[in-house]
Image (spheres, rainbow, N blue to C red):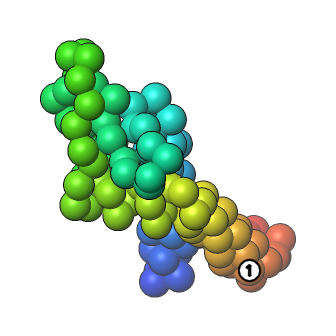
Amino acid sequence: MKMDRNNVIIAVMILASLCVTVYTVETEKVAANFIYEDSEGNVWWRTMPSGSLFPWPRGSGALPAISEVVGVDLFIYKYLIKTSALVILSILLWIVSAVLLTKRLKIYTPKQIER
């Protein structure tokens, strides 16, 4: 199977699916362990120094004091984690990758492989 445009697209889709899935799992872990949302809707890091959800999730430090989640981290938490958008995106990427791969594999019949 030579590398043509369709094979490259499938490889990129599978790689993107894998990256988004790993990012989603890590972000969910950091959010569950290090982020606290109070009854008024304010979002806090449980400890200091502050952690981060972007570009790669990392938990906050060991000092027992809260600090506010701001900027990109707040957007990721409120709109991508709380709404499960990251999980849905990950699932959709895997579905699209599977469909593309299945269509591509149907092209290669046993006669074409033997040649």
Q: Residue lying farthest front?
A: 40
Residue displayed at 34% across by 29% down: 46
Residue under the image location 38 percent in, 59 percent down:
76
Q: Nearer the viewer, residue 15 or 70?
A: 70
Apparent side of residue 106 relative to residue 8 in the rendered image (left or right): right
Identify the residue at image location x=51%, y=56%. Answer: 81
Q: Name the residue carrying label 1.
A: 103
Q: Quadrant of residue 91?
A: bottom right
Q: Nearer the viewer, residue 112 or 66?
A: 66
Give coordinates of residue 83: x percent, y percent.
Answer: 58, 63
Quadrant position of residue 70 = bottom left
**Where, quadrant-wise, is the N terminus in this rendering?**
bottom right
Across and down, in percent, residue 41 comes to 44, 54
**Residue 7 drawn at (x, y percent):** 52, 74
In the rendered image, is residue 115 in sight?
Answer: no
Quarter of the C terminus within the rendering:
bottom right
Q: Is residue 96 above or below residue 75?
A: below
- Looking at the rendered structure, the secondary structure element under dot 1 is helix
Query: Does residue 95 show up?
Result: yes
Q: Amino acid at mark 1?
A: Lys
Is 57 displayed left or right of 95 in the figure? left
x 16%, y 29%: residue: 49
19, 112: nearer the viewer:
19
